[in-house]
Amino acid sequence: MSKQLPPGQFETEKWPILHEGDVYLFDEATWNFRLFGDVKEEVSLSYEEVMRLPKTISTVDMHCVTTWSKFDTTFEGIAFREFLRFVELHPDVKYVKIYGYLNGDRFGYSANLPLDALMGDDALFVYRWKDKHHDWQDISPKHGYPLRFIPPATFYLWKGAKWASGIRFMKKDEPGYWEERGYSMTANPFKEERFAESVSKFRFW
């Protein structure tokens, strides 16, 4: 789907900054990444443990529900699938929630996603990026440092999470932060799945 502009979108070469709440200030001593939910045993990983995981470099397209799309941003990060090595899932787990900090609450932000859509190189917890105008650099605090989840291009960007803090594994789908506020549970930009019902205000990451 690279280079395909979804309906209602415009192309930009900039990476706009939009987010809900305060910018999270990273503290390695207190930060950890939690894997929980429908798993045999919950796991918490330190920043050092997360950063020792195998790395993936992938060039992706981003589509924000505020109508901008940015093509060909290259990210380095940890593929979602790498975290599955740490947990034994209960039978029939088909969904996840990706969590991120919001106003000091490590689980204040969340987005729901189907598990089977996250097994490729395009579902990444990223920490650095580049494009044709920028060489490699760490993502900034406003972009989600130290770890930001970037979803596949078949989802609007709100299905990612800045300041990512954990994954909850689920047998049944349930709404995340913006889904609870009337936005689409599935959020496919190529089908313009923006809203579950009429919402008058755009405010997305």
Image: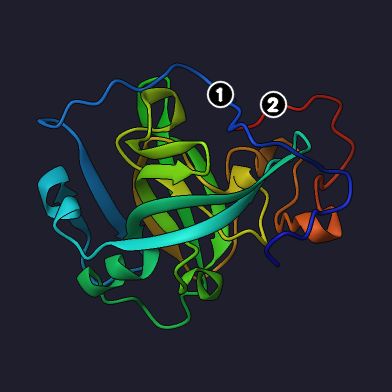
Q: Position of residue 5 (x, y in %)?
A: 80, 54
Q: Position of residue 137 (x, y in %)?
A: 33, 36
Residue found farthest to the top: 22
Mark 1 secondary-structure assignment: loop
The scheme the figure's colours follow is rainbow
Which amino acid, mark 2? Answer: Arg
Q: Is residue 93 above or below residue 128?
A: below
Please report the residue visible at 19 percent of the width from the left and 62 percent of the height from the top.
53
Q: How many marks?
A: 2
Q: Along the line of sight, which residue is nearer the eye, 95 or 11? A: 11
Residue 136 appears anywhere in the view: yes
Q: Is residue 178 above or below residue 186?
A: above
Q: Position of residue 69 (x, y in %)?
A: 71, 43
* Image quadrant in which you'd find residue 202: top right
Q: Earlier in the sequence, mark 2 or mark 1?
A: 1
Residue 20, which numbered label? 1
Residue found farthest to the bottom: 91
Please report the residue visible at 22 percent of the width from the left and 60 percent of the height from the top.
42
* Image quadrant in which you'd find residue 204: top right
Please report the residue visible at 69 percent of the width from the left and 41 percent of the height from the top.
64
Contact, mark 2 vs mark 1 (Cβ under 8 Å): yes
Residue 203, which numbered label? 2
